[in-house]
Structures are given as structure tokens and as C-alpha cells.
Amino acid sequence: PPLPPKLRRKRSHLSPSGVVLDELFLSLQGEAGEVGRPHVFIRLGGCPLRCTYCDTPRSWKGRAQAELHLPAATEELANPLSATQLDGALKRLVDAHQSQFSGLVLAITGGEPLEQVDFLADWLPGAPAPALLETAGIYPARLARLLQLGVRAVLLCASVAFIRASMLAGTPRESAAVIGCISRVRMSMSFSE
């Protein structure tokens, strides 16, 4: 079945020539099998969903400025960033934390990263560290495209617990959209639960 109308909105806030970021920061991963491991979080801007359980609703829309969270200060970066600018910002972040890419994982999150699949497909093959994609999985063909490029793992944001929560706290339409998206991902890809 086609995506619900709210998922088919224009994405004029996203740029084909660069990536629209919300923020970059280094922290310990708090979810799934990567818990406790240092990650560089690359939070992208733009998401067509409006999930009631979203922890960063400000990332739903692309912003003119992204935040680079360094240990001593937060700096603003003008969106969109080219691949070279993103690489430079990531290097500054890792250097500021006196770390190295060899021990890190890039957690690409959002917003919805699959909204910017063209940029990611171009950038990921040369990324400085392995990537973990945090996505709702609402675009199975885009997700498959990134998996072919070596994204090491996928964390689907719409888990069974989220479905239950959205059914209890969300609207029936939101619950149906989440269930439909998970069904499409399961039908187009094989993965273990």
C-alpha cells in the first residue's frame, strides 16, 4: 500500500547538494546492542512523521543552523553542509574529545535519515567510522540502498514497545502508520528480532 498522505509531503527544507543537520555530538549509546559504546551522533534534520514518543521533535524540520556540541562550547554550523564540511566538523568533534575514529561508531539518527538518502549514499562509503542507522524504516527501498553500502546495523525506532505506546497515547491514524511502516520493512527485508 502507498504511504499515508502525511508521509508524502514536499521536502523543500532538505537539500540535494548537502546534508541538513540538527546536531553533532559525542556520547555513549543508550540503546540496543551498542549500549555503553562511544558514538558520534549525527542527527539529521527533517522527518515526515510526528510520533508522540519522539525524543527530538525539533529535528522534524530542517533548521538554518545545526549545533556542533564541543566539550567547552556549542558552535553553530550553517545548513546544508557539504560532505567535506561534515567530515571537517566530525574531525573537530572527535579531536576536541581527544578521541580517535578507530574506537567510535557513527550513529546516524534524526529526524528521519532516510529522508536524505542521496547524500548518505554518496557519503557513507568514505565515512571515517562504521555507521549505525537509527530509522523508523518508513522507506524500505531507501533503507535497502544504504544497507548495500555497508551500514553495519539498523536500529528501527518503531519497535513493538513504541507501537504499544502509540496505540495507548497516540492517535489511531499514527498507530496505523507505524504498524504499516513496520509491515513494509518486514516484507521487503529479512532481519531478526
Image (tube, rainbow, N blue to C red):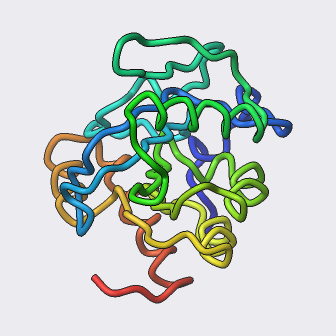
Give the quadrant of the N terminus: bottom right
The quadrant where residue 71 appears: top left
The quadrant where residue 178 appears: bottom left
Q: Nearer the viewer, residue 99 or 189?
A: 99
In the figure, is residue 191 to the left or right of 10? left
Please say if 101 is above or below 62: below
Residue drawn 37% across the image and 63% down it: 155
Q: Is residue 3 visible?
A: yes
Please say if 54 is above or below 187: above
The outermost residue toward the right is: 17
Residue drawn 52% across the image and 84% down it: 189
Residue 159: x and y, percent?
Answer: 27, 63
How many circles with numbers are drawn on the protein? 0
Q: Nearer the viewer, residue 81 or 4?
A: 81
In the figure, is residue 167 to the left or right of 123? left
Give the quadrant of the C terminus: bottom left
Residue 86: x and y, percent?
Answer: 67, 36
Q: Nearer the viewer, residue 81 or 171?
A: 81
The quadrant where residue 53 appears: top left
Q: Is residue 46 visible?
A: no
Residue drawn 54% across the image and 59% down it: 129
Residue drawn 78% across the image and 34% down it: 82
Residue 66: x and y, percent?
Answer: 56, 20
Residue 68: x and y, percent?
Answer: 50, 22
